[in-house]
Amino acid sequence: MKGMGNLLKQAQQMQQKILQLQEELRQRTVEASVGGGMVTVTVNGKGEVLRIKIEPQAVDPGDVEMLEDLVMAGVNEALRKAQEMMAEEMSKLTGGIRIPGLF
């Protein structure tokens, strides 16, 4: 029975570390630029879009579709980078063991 108590204690410690990591990742940011720097998107480690910067040259009233595509590409790339950062940090915490549903 003592082994089960130790296992439960380890699980609680891991849960605390995960919560702490989630908070740390919320404070970290990643940035992605697309279209030669025409659109830059900043997101945090939680996957929240914090900022979208659009260079004035990217705004062409005759080609709104291009700007929409650039914004979409920038957001997707920034979110991909944020997911990579989360996975890398979680891997460090779990020793490389993938725990389904964790992130």
Image (cartoon, rainbow, N blue to C red):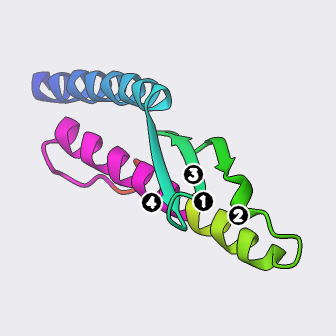
Mark 1 Cα within 10 Å, few/some/many (few <14, many 20+)?
some
Q: Earlier in the sequence, mark 4 or mark 3?
A: 3
Residue pictured at 45% horizontal, 60% vertical: 80
Task: Residue type at mark 3: give it.
Answer: Thr
Q: Is residue 85 magenta?
A: yes
Q: Which mark is residue 80?
A: 4
Mark 2 Cα within 10 Å, few/some/many (few <14, many 20+)?
some
Q: For the magenta stretch, what is the residue range?
A: 76-99
Residue pictured at 64% horizontal, 68% vertical: 70
Q: Is residue 78 magenta?
A: yes
Task: Residue type at mark 1: give it.
Answer: Met
* Circle 4 or circle 3, nearest the eye: 3
Residue pictured at 21% horizontal, 35% vertical: 93
Q: Is residue 8 left or right of residue 61?
A: left
Q: Which mark is residue 66?
A: none
Residue pictured at 27% horizontal, 40% vertical: 89
Cβ–Cβ under 8 Å for marks 3 and 1: no
Where in the figure is residue 30, as x and y percent of width and height? 44, 43
Q: Is residue 101 visible?
A: no
Which residue is denoted by mark 1 in the rendering?
A: 38
Q: Secondary structure at mark 1?
A: loop
Which residue is denoted by mark 3 in the rendering?
A: 40
Q: Secondary structure at mark 3?
A: strand
Task: Residue type at mark 2: give it.
Answer: Ala
Q: CA distance from mark 2 to mark 1?
A: 6 Å
Q: Secondary structure at mark 2?
A: helix
